[in-house]
Amino acid sequence: MKINQMPAITWGRLEVNEAVIDDMEFDKVLLPSETVPAAVKAEDNGDGRKYHFSDENKDALRLDIAIENDSNTNISIEVEGGAYAFVIEDITSASTGTGLVETSYSVGAKASLKFVQIVRTSDAVAVNRINGNAAEDADVSLIQIFVDSKANYTDVRTVLEGDRANLTCDTGYIVDSGNLLDMNYVITHKGKASECLLSIDGVLYDGSSKTFRGTIDLKHGCAEAKGTENENVLLIGDTMINKTIPVILCDEEDVEGNHGATIGKLDEDLVFYLESRGIDRENIDRIMAAARINRVASLIGDEETAAKLTKYIQE
Amino acid sequence: MKEKTHVDDINRSIYDFRFDEDDFYKVDSGLTPEIVMQISEEKGDPEWMKEFRLKSLEIFNRIPMTKAGPSIEGLNMDNIVTYVRPNTKMHADWDEVPEEIKETFERLGIPQAERESLAGVGAQYDSELVYHNIREDVAAQGVIYTDIESALHGPYADMIREHFMKLIPPTDHKFAALHGAVWSGGSFVYVPKGVSVEIPLQSYFRLNAPGAGQFEHTLIIVDEGAYLHFIEGCSAPKYNIANLHAGAVELFVGKNAKIRYSTIENWSKNMYNLNTKRAIVEEGGTIEWVSGSFGSHVSYLYPMSILNGKGAKSEFTGVTFAGKDQDLDTGCKVLMNAPDTTSYVNTRSISKDGGINTFRSSVVVTEKAKGAKSAVSCQSLMVDNISRSDTIPVMDIRCADCDIGHEATIGRISDDTVFYLMSRGLSEEEAKALIVSGFADNVSKELPLEYAVEMNNLIRLEMVGVIG
């Protein structure tokens, strides 16, 4: 089955227009293990769970999802106008196979959502889909950390519907030898003066494979909108596959679109300096890789999650 | 509320003139094995070329059209006449060229440019070259500059057979296959080892016949340590029916050699420009592409550099201007397949009057390319809110020991800058034309002066509607 499809395709021989995985049914409903703050209304929603935030709520909604083969977890987050929501989704696995997690969010006018997602599924393959929309003056902060998954297919789509709607997305990843990370981000600007900023930082080790597709789609009428995406990739080892496709689609004059990417190994001068301070090359690589994740981890603002993650990276 | 100045559609009369072609030889419209054989017979192809054409036609009929790129629904191959031969042979003296054809090139300024600033000129009218000449002192250095058809039958026949459509095989894509089947005209250049051709050669392609296709083939081999600057120009009068250009350019850059290939493309706005250009660069060699795309209804144009030798370099400098009724899909491809290769891409695109620009690129760094360095910079300018501009770059990196950078911006003309220029006495159109010319100076400063002037005139023509 085809997943992570780009809205604007390019030459087929580059094999970046979409990802292809084995056909799956995803017919095993799997509910998350949840810690729900008192002020949040949680209810069943068909085969999934729905969480409704109606006012200022500083406590985090914690969702732990241990995917299994063919599992399907469906999460819906609604943030009412003027409310604040803090959601932490931790996707793990103790088995093999392929599991699907679908998260949708809707953020009302002048509301805020801070959505932290960690994907670390070990030997399992994660198919991770996020669909969202943001109303007028809404503010969405998406913080993602991807580590230690045999394969992680992440598809993030957000529509900035309202005027001045804002999305910041900070993603940090480490892809180990033999593992695969396939990301697809599609941010659609419809609202006037809407803004998005995608900052993707990652590390690829020898024999790993990663694809980052980032599409900023500036629709007609989104005057004064601004979309920016950046990816920085550190390559450690000799050979790996890194594909970066930063796309801007622009159907409006009075907008600003920017994208940038830097891909390469550690700067030789930096390595020389650190080696002269007595740090061996293996530790230099580890320190620099951790720095990429820590930049993103420092944005989480939740000690329990940050501690769990820091410990995990140090392992 | 911001006020917009309406700029009327322009008068392109300096390019938009035509002469009758009643006495020209033409094949029927459409694409059949019989038509392909008819072209082959007319051109006196050697046997291998006849077979090559038929095989290419078979591939054309078999492979699908790429899904990436603008729609070409308006192009019906059944209506395209693939071969139109003017009623003249090729000459080496302008005085022997028939008057109307000569006048065409006079009005385009080609003989004058030849006298003033070129080492040689080839002029193609519809499907065949009508004029070809090279300066005696350049020829004396052993430089070969001739039409492909002559080369196919002369002392360079083996060289042509060895290189023809080896960089762009007919299996590459549908219109490469079409080119293989019906190609006609174009130039062959060979620059011997160590020879530097100090002033440029130029080929100019004029497609005059309504509903016709032009399929010229340019094959350039620059041997070890040699240098060549080759300039390509093209134009056509506008018709109400589709015309097609599916040329091919194959460049072989030897060890420590260098080619600069400059193009000012100004096809009429009924043209489907589905052109393919490719260079392979050996150790220490350099390919420099300088590309200005102004014309065509639809363009697919992505010059490709294959850096196959250690330390090989490529530079691509391009500007694309998409106006009313234009959907221009341009960019470049780079394959870095050897150690210490470097590539630099610097493009500008301008969208105006409902024009659609797409910058499309790929930079592929293979496992062999240790020490590779690449930088891509593309900037797009939206002149109004009815136009469109997309950028779709791909980087495929498979070697850790490399340094790859990419940056792109899309934006509009600053109101403050326009206001400032207007306060200095310029009209809004003049101010915007000046800003766009400055925006496109990455290309104009890489061109010989006469061509930079032509390019700036084209920008001015698009922005203001007059020259001068």
Image (cartoon, coloured by chain):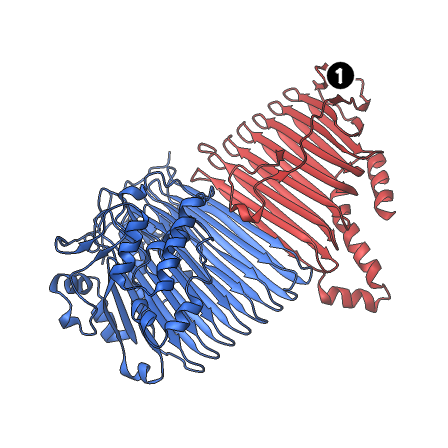
* Secondary structure found at label 1: strand
Chain whose colour in the figure is red? A
Mark 1 surroundings within 10 Å by alpha-carbon count, few (fewer than 14), some (14 through 19), many (20 or more):
some
Name the residue located 75 percent from the left edge and 55 percent from the top edge: A206
Q: Is residue A249 visible?
A: yes
Residue B350 horizontal side relative to residue A7, left or right = left
Q: Quadrant of the N terminus of chain B?
A: top left
Q: Position of residue A229 (x, y in %)?
A: 59, 44
Name the residue located 17 percent from the left edge and 53 percent from the top edge: B17
Residue B380 lies, with reference to residue B94, above or below; the image says above
Residue at the disc numbered 1: A42
Q: Quadrant of the C terminus of chain B?
A: bottom left
Chain whose colour in the figure is blue? B
Which residue is more in the foreground, A275 or A57? A275
Q: Is residue B457 visible?
A: no
Which residue is more in the foreground, B44 or A264? B44
The residue lying furthest to the front in this view is: B47
Residue B146 lies, with reference to residue A200, above or below; the image says below
Counting the numbered discs, the total is: 1
Q: Position of residue B109 (x, y in %)?
A: 21, 65
Residue A84 lies, with reference to residue A94, above or below; the image says above
Which residue is more in the foreground, B248 or A10? B248
Q: Quadrant of residue A85?
A: top right
Q: Position of residue B74 (x, y in %)?
A: 32, 39
User: Given the image, on which type of amino acid does mark 1 rest?
Assistant: Ala
Q: Position of residue B204 (x, y in %)?
A: 28, 63
Q: Quadrant of residue B69?
A: top left
